[in-house]
Image (cartoon, rainbow, N blue to C red):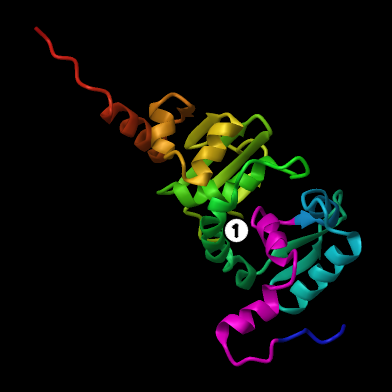
Amino acid sequence: MPPRRSYDQYCSAARALDAVGDRWTLLIVRELLAGPRRYTDLHADLPGVSTDVLASRLKDMERDGLTTRRRLPPPGAAYVYELTPHGRALLPVLLALGAWGQGELAERGPTDAVRAHWFALPLLRLLEGEGLVEVRLEEGDFHLHVGAVDGPVYGHGPAPRDPDARLVMDAGTCLAVVRGELDLTDAVRAGRAEVGGDGAIAKSLREDRASAVPAVREG
């Protein structure tokens, strides 16, 4: 494998960019924050990346200790890629990058691809506490492991068990929330997002809604 390109600068930011500054690398990390993925799954959820570039980036990331590759036991018998602890430590970087870039989400262009789970990290940044949250959008379902320290922080499809909270909203509402134009609790309060579940996160969102309703005076 050819040596890694380097800025050759004794600076922590430059060293970090040596490892993750190439095009597609951080987006691969975004996908692998959902847990182990097959090459074909990664390629499907990274529209625009060529097979050669994806294979090259995965090799570079494995060499740099960001990912590992392993073979699933039968009947799967397929290879999957997953983040190492060093790779998972990039979560705060992606959350901060998403917060910085939320203002760049102007109107969706005619060639812009979208996947439901791409809203996972922005919503994860906005939710507080710990628990399993299922999110239902028109484009599909995904779930969040809010407060997770190890392992996947989100997943594709419905929650694997009864979630602590379930959020249902349309794509326009979700986009307004992640753009910072609409607070999630305000979306719930206005009826633009529905909340289900009995966990602390669900109760908190419902209490915020209830607190905004004026008390009815008797007499």
Image quadrant holding the N terminus, namely: bottom right
> SS of the residue at dot 1?
loop
Magenta range is 7-36
Residue at the top extreme, as displayed: 219
Residue located 60% across and 38% down the image? 159
Residue located 36% across and 30% down the image? 206
Residue 196: x and y in percent read 47, 28
Name the residue type under label 1: Gly
Q: Which residue is mark 1?
A: 151
Image quadrant holding the C terminus, namely: top left
Q: Identify the image quadrant of residue 214.
A: top left
Q: Is 69 drawn above or below residue 7 in the view shown?
A: above
Residue 145 in sight from this viewpoint: no
Residue 107 in sight from this viewpoint: yes
Residue located 67% across and 38% down the image? 157
- Asked if residue 35 lies in the magenta stretch, the reply is yes
Residue at the left extreme, as displayed: 219
As drawn, is 32 to the left or to the right of 170? Answer: right
Front residue (pair 120, 17): 17
Q: Is 153 drawn above or below residue 6 in the view shown?
A: above
- Asked if residue 202 lies in the magenta stretch, the reply is no
